[in-house]
Image (cartoon, rainbow, N blue to C red):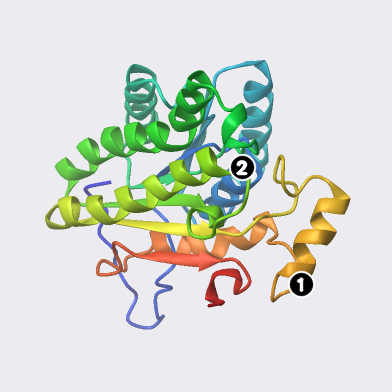
Amino acid sequence: MSDFVPTPNPEEPQDPFLLKGRVALVVGAGDPLGRAAAVALEEAGADGAVASLRAGPQEVVRVNSVANEIWSLGRANVAITLDASDANSVDAAVARTTSELGGLDILINAADLPVAAPLDELTPEDWHAILAANLLAPAMTARAAARVMTINGYGRIINLVSVLAARGVANTSSYAAAHAGVLAMTRSLSQELARSGITVNALQVGIYEGQHGFGDDPETVRQVARMLPAKALVKPEDVGPAVVALAADSGFITGETIALDGAATARV
């Protein structure tokens, strides 16, 4: 919010990761990573809106569940169902967030629609759907949020992307390409929005427990874990502290991609 002015008590050092007075919008909050990000931000003191990535009854149930969890923490919260790849739907969600919560300071893009299929089986319609959910959705939400943040002269945009954007794995060409596009967009937007007081960073997350298509099958989990330096998959709740750190008042950390993958991408 534009009128947020910290008033430190000289007798008590201020927690640099305290987000009290900030307003966050988490898109994709019905999925495990989005839920973890939303809960962590609220625990750090932010008020916020939790929004779906796609419209549909299952999305409504998941988003409302996260909203109820956050309400139990005593934080102001709004649950929104939207199609994040539709510009009008996104604009309405941002408008509702600013209207009901008084502003928008932090955007978390947790768009994730995993797809594992060989190239020969992917139709043009498949590509459009995958790119819409994993690339167009973060672009539309970033655009809508940046318009508000530019007026306020402050903002934090954090894009959650898959480790597959940086590591080639068979049968993930469409999904990996979409997330690689989000990494490129992150770097470009950090340049474009820097003078407006807006930072744009990416959190590159390894295959995580419960991830649809990758981390939800026990045998696949065992096989993947054996290949990783940490010998374990990422837990969704591991995302929370990293998101809070990037959402804090660290104005010169921008254009960066931080890996949260147990050293999976550190290998040469």
**Viewer-nearest residue: 137 or 78:** 137
User: What's the residue type where badge 2 is placed?
Assistant: Ile
Q: Which mark is residue 70?
A: 2
Q: Residue at x 54, y 60 (%)?
A: 167
Of labels 2 and 1, earlier in sequence is 2
Q: Residue at x 55, y 54 (%)?
A: 164
User: What's the residue type where badge 1 is placed?
Assistant: Lys
Q: Residue at x 53, y 50 (%)?
A: 42
Q: Is residue 211 left or right of residue 134?
A: right
Task: Say which residue label 1 marks.
Answer: 231
The spot of residue 146 in percent (x, y) is 24, 41
The outermost residue toward the right is 219
Q: CA distance from mark 2 to mark 1?
A: 32 Å
| Mark 1, secondary structure of its residue | loop
**Viewer-nearest residue: 257 or 196:** 257
Q: Is residue 66 left or right of residue 95?
A: right
